[in-house]
Image (spheres, rainbow, N blue to C red):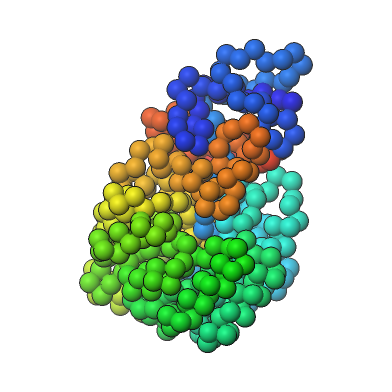
Amino acid sequence: MLAIRAAHCYDGGSFRPDGVTVLVEGERIAGVEAVGYDVPEGVEVTSYDGTLLPGLIDAHVHLVAEGIRPGAPGSLEAAGALGDDGLDAAIARSLATNAAAGVTTVRDLGDRRYRTLVARDRRTTGEPRIVAAGPPLTVPEGHCHYLGGEVEGVEGVRAGVRDHVERGVDVVKVMASGGLLTLGTDIFGVQFSPEELRAAVEETHRAGLRIIAHCQSEAGARHAVAAGVDGLEHATLLSPEGIAVPDDLISEIAARDITVDPTLGMDLSRAIPIEQMPAHVQEMVQRLGLTPAQIAVGRARQLARMIEHGVRIVTGSDAGVTPPKRHGNVWRAVVQLLDAGLTPAQALATATSLAADECGLTDTTGRIAEGLNADLLVVDGDLSADLTALAHPRQLWVRGTLLPGQRRTA
């Protein structure tokens, strides 16, 4: 047994201003005590001046891509040309990068040939836990078709879902709209017919799994909500007029208890100049007049309305898809939620306890509580006063295993 004592603590729901002593035995938390707890004789005690919190959960990553292609708009499409060895190597590097940034669980929402399931089942000591969707379901030549999840027609969609279930996925992802990174798809429109999308939902629910939908467009979000999905990824709600804030749609998302992952957290220092972007992206940006600053303002206003309506928000980064979306940047997405009106404690919950609930891991991780896995992170400073301290991880335990070395990301 070991004891971790910290001057500050966030337990997955609230800050504990008087600090905490957490007892760890094997992979699990054996006890949560006051900072001055008299530790039993023979128990090793490690004390920190910073904040102890649950390991972070990134609810939207692509482990097969690393976001490192210089001079290119993205790297996810490159995964389509990799063999198993290349995919496995990328997954291992992506997991290591996430761990170095304090991430103990990732939800992978788009791989190729189900290689993240192989990594998940291998359960390597010290690597972040994986919740895996396999290749996302998409229409022929649709968004991310290069990952191998193309299906067509109601029966084709049902067969595609059944194949995912048989292979052991934890969640199903479907592309309800086009995407910026796939040439020829409609960023403002929808993918799949209403009948096909409903079939995907029905088949997934029949298997007892959740289904989440990629939707960049307002039309795609309405399409997915009508079909009965459980979660919306991005939910940028783009329309030909810009970023929409439709109260009727937001009210319906809340009423149906649909989770939204806005996939914030872009590192603008790694953004590609507009003139280097694909022509179709340049055209859209110029037509809508959306600079990165304007996008940030529009998304903050949009998310504030969702929060007012009671929509459940979780935090994912979409890590790996482009250079500004490198793995290990989920902390940026958490901090950005402050602009939408969340408190530091509420923002942290989106990447700890709420994300664990969304991933089906309520009884496993996401909180500092007796009996849960010892997925624990220490960061420098007092997070209740400065949430950007998340950028400075000091120490990390993954299922009770201490990762060596001091890590710093920025």
Give residue 333's position: percent from left, percent from top. 42, 50
* Residue 293 against residue 139 in the figure, above or below: above
The residue depicted at 62 percent of the width and 80 percent of the height is 159
The residue depicted at 64 percent of the width and 65 percent of the height is 169
Left or right, residue 348 beside residue 307 = right
Q: Quadrant of residue 33?
A: top right
* Residue 316 against residue 218 in the figure, above or below: above
Give residue 177's position: percent from left, percent from top. 41, 75
The residue depicted at 35 percent of the width and 78 percent of the height is 189
Q: Quadrant of residue 156?
A: bottom right
The residue depicted at 52 percent of the width and 77 percent of the height is 199
* Residue 339 against residue 225 in the figure, above or below: above
Is residue 23 visible in the rendered image? The answer is yes
Give residue 25's position: percent from left, percent from top. 73, 30
Instruction: Report the front residue among 166 and 146.
Output: 166
Is residue 143 visible in the rendered image? The answer is no
* Residue 35 against residue 299 in the figure, above or below: above
Give residue 128's position: percent from left, percent from top. 64, 49
Left or right, residue 349 beside residue 310 = right
Instruction: Report the front residue among 70 and 208.
Output: 208
Q: Quadrant of residue 107?
A: bottom right
Residue furthest to the front in view is 206
Looking at the rendered image, the quarter that the N terminus falls into is top right
Instruction: Report the front residue among 402 and 54.
Output: 54
Badge count: 0
Left or right, residue 137 beside residue 371 = left
